[in-house]
Amino acid sequence: MSTRGHGPSSHLAARPEDDMERMEQRPTRKLRKLIPMFAPYKWRALTTILLMLVVTATGLAGPALAQVAIDHGIGDSNSGVLVLTVVLFVAAGLIGVVAGYWQTYLSAWVGERVLLDLRTRVFNHMMRLELGYHERVPTGRSVSRLTSDIEALEGLVSDGFTSLVVNGLTFVGVVVILFAYDWQLALLAFTVFPLLAAGTAVFRVTSARAYRRTRERVAEVLSVLQETLSGMRVVQGFGRQDHARSTFREANDAYREANMATIRLSGVYFPGIELLSGVGLAVILWFGSNRVLDGDLSIGVMVAFIGYMSSFFDPIQQLSQLYSTFQSAMAALEKILGVLETEPELADTPDAVALPSIRGDVDLEGVSFGYRPDRPVLHDLSLTIPAGTTAALVGSTGAGKSTLAKLIARFYDPQGGVVRIDGTDLRAVTQASLRSQLAIVPQEGHLFAGTLRENLAFGAPHATDEELLSALRAVGGDDMLDALPDGLDSTVNERGGGLSAGQRQLVSFARALAAQPRLLILDEATSSVDVQTEARIEHAMQAILPGRTAVLIAHRLSTIRRADMIVVLDHGRILERGSHDELMAVGGRYASLYGDWEAATAAAAGRAAPHA
């Protein structure tokens, strides 16, 4: 029944950067991962390849037709041959235009769908990865994988493969034709090839590193941008706009410098190709012209040879430019594959079964857990929460309250011990069947851009409007609903913008209630609301909690007092457990905490009284 993630170092083992490093300098392996994504479109891809052959053939026909026209049409004063070659010239051009159009269309059609499938696959895989992954990896970096890295592949997938095939076939065809015309001139043409190969090898190695740095820098830019915009309230609240500008400028400058490195490399390499092309052509002109003057070579063959020499260096230049695209795409692909090859630390076992409708008995036996192997959070903790019980977890910051709640929701698996619901080890059931029966209200309820209806129905997609309205009213949202002009159709901005903190939390409570959970987890759910809103929620909880197992993490006295069971945690261990009255009678840690809370509440009320 065990799954990955039980070892002490498991929470550090799945870093995407590790996967990226393992794949560096292995472009063939990366391409093998990409090629199967063309399989659903194989017939269109094959048709595209056939059209590429046609385009290549029509492109190579020109110099050969010119040689026939010069030597056998003009040279022999044969008008019939001349007319025929002209007709074939025009026909080849027309065929090339038509084949080129459809080849371009089909290659783009296939490429766009492959990119769509890849983007969907990466997103779906991210949805499979456990909460710990998303807590480790900056959001901006994940967004970069789905946006700029996918876009970097577009030049390769949509145009790159086409350019590779056409120019590759052209290069091979030109070499064959040159040797067929005159092997001595062909060998002379290739005297510059060693220099070309050496320059290309150096460019390949240095540009690979440069383009990898570029992909890393753009991810950093997106990460800084996302974090700054998400925390704009804090940035402006502390007057840290200048610091944010400076941080963004530094990330942008690093990205610009990485881009400039690739530009400098291209600025040296591609003019070098042009120079070698000119040298090769000059060699052919000199020796070829002398042979024409000696009568050892026809003018038509010389003209064709020069034409094919241009076609010899053009594919090299095109393939060299493609290599820049290729390096950028490979740098992006290795990061994308780093995500896809990151195995979920928390996964359903092959024999996992659906959790049946639960009563809500929660049992933790000998549970130990730590986000890092050298920093355990929970130590051999055992706790039983009977079905229908409301258990409040209290303790100072870092005591392990939220971690304990995450284990019950199976956002993580314990590294020691077992967590059971209704006697069933959570590692033996599917995550979907567990999550469908629980609901979580965090400290700051996250709302999505859309309508109020869509947010309320997030955990209950098939709920009717009446059920959604009933859930909202049950948590005291009548006033809020009356204040919204369009009712359930009212627009909710990203992260609940436009609603007060209290309104956002009411919607979060109503969303949880609409899902009709058997297990409810409230993680500081009332700490961000005002006293009036808290009173509404406290009243609503009296109707929500009965009949459900609830785990509350709270500091508010009213919430804690009403719990059936209070569990006092300290540094990952249970110090005390019992009802409010029982723990107060003991006079231990809870009584001390409660006294501090009560004094703080009285002081706050005293400060507020003069303003009343």
Image (cartoon, grey):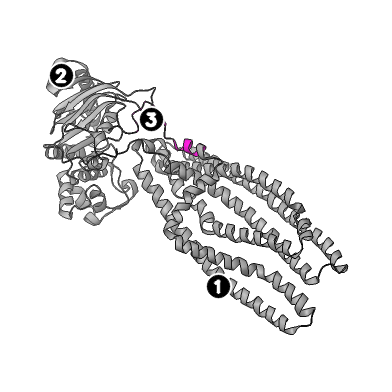
- Residue 610 falls in which quadrant of the image? top left
User: Can residue 254 be seen?
Assistant: yes
Residue placed under numbered mark 3 in the picture:
10
- Cα separation, mark 3 vs mark 1, equals 57 Å
The answer for how far apart the CA atoms under marks 1 and 2 are is 88 Å
Q: Disc 2 designates what residue?
A: 584
Residue 264 spot, x, y in % from top left: 66, 47
Q: Picture coordinates of residue 204 (x, y %)?
A: 63, 45
Mark 3 burial class by Cα count in 10 Å: few <14, some 14-19, many 20+? some
Proximity of marks 3 and 1: CB atoms separated by less than 8 Å: no
For the C terminus, the image quarter is top left
Q: Residue furthest right?
A: 294
Residue for point 84% across, 65% down: 289
Against 581, residue 205 (above or below) is below
Residue 432 is labelled as none
Q: Is residue 351 above or below residue 99?
A: above
Query: In the rendered structure, which segment of residues is drawn in magenta?
Result: 4-21
Looking at the image, which residue is at 40% across and 40% down? 231
**Secondary structure beneath label 1:** helix
- Disc 1 marks which residue? 98
Please, what is the three-letter code of the amino acid marked with disc 2?
Answer: Met
Residue 267 point in image, percent of width and height: 68, 50
- Residue 23 higher or lower than 304, as above or below: above
Q: Would you say the residues marked 2 and 3 are in contact, meaning their CB atoms lie under 8 Å apart?
A: no
Q: Find out whether residue 402 is within the magenta segment.
A: no
Q: Circle 2 — which element?
A: helix
**To which quarter of the image does residue 12 belong?**
top left
Mark 2 and mark 3: span between their CA atoms?
41 Å
Residue 485 showing in the rendered view: no
Task: Report whether 336 appears left or right of 205.
Answer: left
